[in-house]
Image (tube, rainbow, N blue to C red):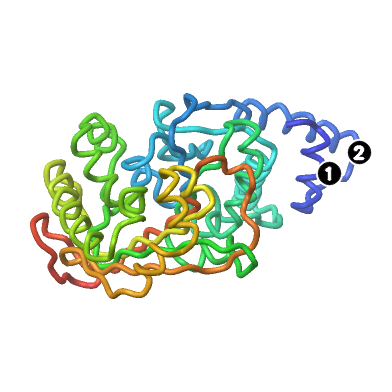
Amino acid sequence: MEPEHVEKLLHVLEIRCESPMEHRALVESLAKTIKDRFGRRVLPPPGESLALSVMTPKTAALAFDRVYKIPAHVDPVPDSIGFYGATLPEIVWWAGGLLAISLEELGIPALRLGKGPGSPESERANLRLLCSEFPGVFGAMPTIFYHSAGNQTHDFPVGTHQVLTAVIRNLALVDEKNLTWEQVIEFRKDAAARAKYRRIVRWIDVELATQSPKAVEDMIAIRLDDYEWALKKHGLRATMGALSCLLDPKFLATTTAATAATSLTAGNAWAALAAAALTGGHAMLSFGSVYVDGLDEQRKTNYEVAYVHQLAFRRFSGERVVAGDQAG
């Protein structure tokens, strides 16, 4: 991080030494420290799927090839799974947040940018801004994972760009609190289990998006059985909840055959799904569309804009869905 950027960061945090010489020394020292601690990139191989999640990186890593690696985190994403661009927005956010926390612990008041890595405040602080320079580094935009619908709405407010929506409710979702990186790494080694898991967690794909409502119900029922088998096989603790997603139809269409793309973008297949009340096994499915502010044109072919992974505090037995106690 260059000294001029540190100077701006300190100005935002309302921090300044009384002596100009001391202030300059502080700026130069912080610039070196920040560069050493936050300036190392972790680059993924080309073509791998990327997910950005502040609150549930382990869960995201079960379904995506790479997940965002928050620097200086107490439970860091392994380099073999993570990615980090060391772009200016990233460095300013994480370094500024940790600097404010450190000063506060010393009894020095400073404007807070957030409550540190891995906090709900970090998620609400506009994850789209955090990854705004990723296309220049990675050649693509990641799919963003949120843990609440409100945070997604904060990043994608009402606008003029139409996106497709899909929700699967009454679904057993892996509980991040009961997941370790060792479990994630072991699960990722099991190609069969991981494929079955991904076909539910990243459930809107080309095969499903152009099917009739009845075919969708049948496909989800089969995928759901496979998914629950994968959870049980690896002993992954799950809680009932809902998984929703935003999809860019422009890029979803580019992954289909020409005839399927024409039908999808014309709204025929999606309209039929949206008009039906569907169930797949014990899961409830719904489809629709909303208008959000302009999406990034540099998404390439990544049609998965965002997911909301929201638990509803009902436990999953490993074989069937059961009602459980309210979580604290």
Q: Amino acid at mark 2?
A: Pro
Viewed as shown, does residue 138 lie left or right of 10? left
Outermost residue, left direction? Answer: 319
In the image, 82 versus 261, the foreground residue is: 261
What residue is shown with label 1?
17
Q: Is residue 274 above or below residue 173?
A: below
Q: Position of residue 325 (x, y in %)?
A: 19, 71
Residue drawn at x 36%, y 69% is 272
Q: Which residue is label 2 attached to?
A: 20
Residue 235 location (% of width, % of height): 15, 45
Specify the quadrant of the image occupied by residue 194: top left
x, y percentage for residue 96?
66, 45
Q: How many marks?
A: 2
In front of the other: 234 or 49: 49
Is any atom of residue 328 visible in this view? no
Query: Mark 2: few, some, or many residues within 10 Å (few <14, many ≥20)?
Result: few
Label 2: element kind: helix
Q: Is residue 310 visible?
A: yes
* Crowding at mark 1 (Cα within 10 Å: few <14, some 14-19, many 20+): few
As drawn, the residue found furthest toward the front would be 259
Q: Quadrant of residue 156?
A: bottom right
- Residue occupying image coordinates x 36% and y 75%: 275
Residue drawn 72% across and 33% down? 30
